[in-house]
């Protein structure tokens, strides 16, 4: 489990990125979110569970586009509160419900949702425990989808340990291992989309998304906060030193 200090640093970085205009923090952004939604056959009236909802951008976008109902869950009360305000501002409070709960212990009955959606959250959880809950609350014939940073090839122990350390509990798998994991969890018709080659330099992509004002705001925040500055530099160094290993993709599986 992440330490309080580490968790606070990660939350602060997320908050900083959101505050300067970055709407989605996961690789691939809205484009990949909507690709997953299509693969999950989300339609008007679908019931969707959004794991690790952050500021609610994915849940709001799905509700707006498809007319589905969404429940978002997140461990961060600050993120949950912000997401609730965003949904209310957009007139979606009756369509979306955000809850500050632990996704390892979902307070929903079996076969509740048509789709369970996760983006860059399972890698910080007990994957087997979490996925058992994801599958349990998914209706028969429904879908479980997850977008994560993956290993393009098995990394050395040093790389695995370093990722775990700087992201306070981060643990992922190769694309093949993720696909096998979905099958072990009882999911079928598993679809893999590896879009690693489209995101070879995450730093460049974030700079493009931020623009000049966003970069200036982040630079100022980092100058004032030594811990944030150190963490951001460590992340950037890790990505640059491990390009051969780091990949991005999403997986969609169906519950029989």
Image (cartoon, grey):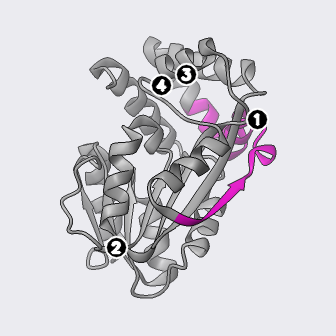
Q: CA distance from mark 2 to mark 4?
A: 30 Å
Indicate the quadrant containing the C terminus: top left, top right, bottom left or bottom right: bottom left
Foreground tag (3 vs 1): 3
- Asked if residue 128 is positioned above or below residue 135 in the image, the reply reads above
Foreground tag (1 vs 4): 4
Q: CA distance from mark 3 to mark 1?
A: 17 Å
The residue carrying mark 4 is: 167
The reply to whether the C-beta atoms of the residues labelled 2 and 1 are less than 8 Å apart is no
- Disc number at residue 201? 1
- Asked if residue 134 is positioned above or below residue 143 in the image, the reply reads above
Q: CA distance from mark 2 to mark 1?
A: 35 Å
Q: Earlier in the sequence, mark 3 or mark 2?
A: 2
- Disc number at residue 127? none
Q: Earlier in the sequence, mark 2 or mark 4?
A: 2
Q: Tell me the SS state at disc 1.
A: loop
The residue carrying mark 3 is: 163
Instruction: Let me know if residue 55 appears in the view.
Output: yes
Q: CA distance from mark 1 to mark 4?
A: 18 Å
Task: Find the magenta span and give its range.
Answer: 188-217
- Circle 4 packing at 10 Å, graded few (<14), some (14-19), many (20+), is some
Q: Earlier in the sequence, mark 2 or mark 1?
A: 2
The residue carrying mark 2 is: 113
The reply to whether the C-beta atoms of the residues labelled 1 and 4 are less than 8 Å apart is no
Q: Tell me the SS state at disc 3.
A: helix
**Residue 10 position by quadrant:** top left
Query: Residue 103: horizontal and vertical position, in percent?
Result: 29, 49
């Amino acid at each position: 489990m992440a330490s309080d200090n580490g968790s606070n640093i990660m939350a602060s970085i997320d908050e900083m990125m959101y505050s300067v205009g970055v709407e989605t923090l996961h690789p691939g952004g809205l484009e990949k979110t909507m690709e997953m939604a299509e693969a999950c056959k989300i339609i008007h009236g679908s019931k969707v569970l959004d794991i690790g909802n952050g500021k609610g951008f994915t849940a709001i976008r799905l509700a707006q586009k498809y007319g589905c109902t969404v429940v978002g869950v997140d461990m961060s009360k600050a993120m949950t509160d912000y997401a609730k305000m965003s949904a209310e501002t957009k007139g979606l409070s009756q369509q979306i419900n955000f809850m500050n709960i632990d996704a390892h212990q979902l307070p929903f009955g079996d076969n509740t949702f048509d789709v369970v959606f996760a983006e860059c959250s399972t890698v910080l959880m007990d994957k087997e425990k979490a996925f058992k809950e994801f599958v349990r609350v998914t209706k028969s014939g429904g879908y479980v989808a997850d977008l994560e940073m993956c290993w393009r090839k098995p990394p050395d122990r040093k790389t695995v340990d370093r990722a775990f350390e700087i992201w306070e509990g981060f643990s992922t798998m190769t694309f093949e291992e993720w696909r096998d994991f979905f099958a072990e969890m009882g999911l079928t018709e598993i679809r893999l989309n590896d879009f690693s080659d489209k995101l070879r330099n995450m730093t460049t992509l974030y700079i493009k998304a931020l623009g000049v004002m966003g970069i200036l705001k982040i630079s100022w925040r980092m100058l004032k906060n030594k811990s944030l500055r150190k963490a951001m530099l460590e992340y950037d160094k890790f990505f640059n030193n491990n390009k051969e290993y780091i990949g991005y993709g999403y997986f969609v599986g169906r519950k029989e």
